[in-house]
Amino acid sequence: MPVIVKRWYQLISLCFTSLLLAACGQAQLPSGLVYCSEGNPESFNPQLVTSGTTIDATSNQIYSRLVNYSQAKADIIPGLATEWLMSEDGLSYQFTLREHVSFHKTRQFTPARDFNADDVLFSFNRIIDPLHPYHLVSRTGYPFFQSIGFADLIESIEKVNDYQVIFHLTRKDASFLSNLATDFAVILSAEYGYQLLSQGKPEDIDYYAVGTGPFQLNQYVKNEYIRYKKHPVYWGPTVELDQLVFDITPRSTARIAKLITGDCSVSALPKAGELAVVAQHPDVIVEAKPGLNVSFWAFNTQKPPLDDVRVRRALAHAIDKRNILDAVYNDTAVEATGVLPPASWAYSKNLSPNEYNPQKAIELLNEAGINNLSINVWAMPVARIYNPSALKTAELIQADLARIGVKLNIISYDWSVFTQKLSTSNYDSVLIGWNADNSDPDNFFTPLLSCAALASNNNRSRWCQKDFEHLLTQAQSVTSQPERKAFYQSAEAIISDQVPMVTLAHAKKVVLKKNNITAMQIRPYGGISFAKAIQTSEEGE
C-alpha cells in the first residue's frame, strides 16, 4: 500500500476509533462496534418505507414487534406479545402483551409509563385509520401495509385491557401473523406521539425515534454517521454492545478498505468481484447464506408499447441471465426462473421461464409491429442484497437489447431522488428487487404485484390482473401448505405468461466482518440486527 494512502487509512482509523470512544464515554472499545453502511436512512420509522437501508438502521436496532419469526424453528415466536389465540373462524387474533417493557428515555422524551395496549392501537391505527392524528403526518404513506391491503384486512383493533388486544379481521389471512413479524410492523410510543402532537411537531416521531428495542438513537449526521447507545433496560436478551455506530459509506471499495484497516468491524453489501480481495485478509470473515430475495426488471405495463404482452415477452427472451450472473454476481446468486427463490417452501422447480432466445424476441417484436424501439430503464445507484450493481446489470441488458435492434437508455439518480421519482411511476422500466421480510411466500407476491400494491406505488410493474389477484386471495384463505403452494405456483405461471417483470437472480445474503465479531445472526430475510453481537478485544491472526 502506498505510504500516503496508508497514512490516510491510519488517520481515518484514528478518527473512527476516537468517535467510538467518545460515544462510549468511559466504556472500553470492545463494548462498541462500527458498521459500514451503504447510505442514509430515509427516516427512522420503518412503517413509512420499503428501503433496505432504512430497515437496517431502524427496525432491529430501535424497535420491537408484537411477534418475531424464528429461522431456527421456522415459526412465529413471542416479541412484545407473549402469546396469542386465533378464533375458530380465523377472523380474530387476541394477543397477551408483555409487561414491564420500557421505552427509550431520550433528550426529547422521558416515558411516564411502560409499554401497553395503547401503544399497539396507536401504532397500527396510525396506518389504517385516515382520521388518526398521525395518519397524514407521513408524506410517503405506509407502502408495505398499503401494498398488502392491511387497512382493508383490519376491521378494528380492540383494547380488552392494558395488556390484551384483539385484531378483528374482515377475512381469513394465513399471512397475517407473518406480516406482523415483518420489520415494518414496529411499535411506537403513544405517549411520545401525543406529547409531540401537543408541542406542534408530530413529524419528529419519525426522525427522533423512540422504541423499545436494544439500542436507542443518540445522534444522526447525514452522510456521516448514526450513533446509537444501548437501551439500559431492554426487555430482551442481554445486549453486550454499549455503543453502535453506523458509518455511512456509499462506495463499496471504501467500505472494504475501512474493514481491512479496522475502521469498521462489519461491512454491508460487498460487490461480488471484491470478495477475492477480502480473501487475502485472514482476519476478515465472509458470511453468506441463501437469501429470500429476488432481483427483477419491472416493466411499466401502463405505458405503450410495454402494455403489449408480446413486447414484454420479446424483451424477456432477449436477456442472457447467465451472463448477468457471471458478470455481476460472480457465483453469489442463482438464476431466477420465477419470483420465489429456491429457499421458499412454495418454490416451483417445474416453472417454464422465458428462455434466452434472441431470434424469438425479434419475431415477437415484428408480430407486434414494433420497429426502432427505444425505452428507458431506471437503475438503482446503490448496491442491494439482491443486486450488487444495478448499473452494471443495466449495461449488460443494454447490450443484449442492442442485438435485437432495441435501444435501452440507462437513467440513474441519487438514491433519495431515485426513491422520490419512483413514486411518480413516470418510467418505462426499472431495475430493482425485493428482500423478503418473512418466510411466507405471500411476501413475494402481494407487496410486489397485487392491485393494492399498485395503489400504493409499490407495484413497480403497474400491473393488476384479476385471475392473479384471485389466486392470492385463495392462498391467504387456507392454512394448508400444499394447498397454498399450489395457488402460488399457479400465480407464478401467470407471471411467466404475462411478463410484468423479468426476474433475474436470487442472491446470497453476504456480510463481511472481523473475526473478533461473534454471535451475529445472518437471516435470509429482513434487516440486519446487532442485538446479539459480541466484539472481543483481540482479532485472530
Image (spheres, rainbow, N blue to C red):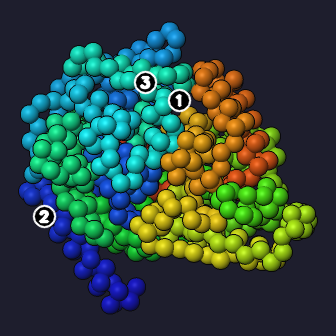
Q: Which residue is mark 3?
A: 155
Identify which amino acid the numbered label 2 is placed on.
Ala
* Circle 3: element type: strand
Query: In terms of sequence position, does the residue under pointer 3 or pointer 1 come before the other?
Result: 3
Q: In the image, which is nearer the foreground, mark 3 or mark 1?
A: 3
Left or right: 115, with 475 as reference point: left
Residue projecting furthest to the front: 131
Q: In the image, which is nearer the foreground, mark 1 or mark 2?
A: 1
Q: Which residue is mark 2?
A: 22
Badge 2 crowding class, 10 Å Cα cut-off, few under 14, some 14 to 19, many 20 or more, is few
Picture residue at 65% right of the left edge, 49% below the top? 463
Badge 3 crowding class, 10 Å Cα cut-off, few under 14, some 14 to 19, many 20 or more, is some
Query: In terms of sequence position, does the residue under pointer 2 or pointer 3 come before the other?
Result: 2
| Quadrant of the rendering where the C terminus is positioned | bottom left
Say which quarter of the image contains residue 194. top left
Q: In x, y percent, where is residue 48? A: 38, 49
Q: In x, y percent, where is residue 282? A: 44, 64
The total number of labels drawn is 3
Q: In x, y percent, where is residue 297? A: 65, 60
Say which quarter of the image contains residue 232. top left
- Disc number for residue 53: none
CA distance for labels 3 and 1: 16 Å
- Residue 372 seen in the figure: yes
Q: Which residue is mark 1?
A: 175
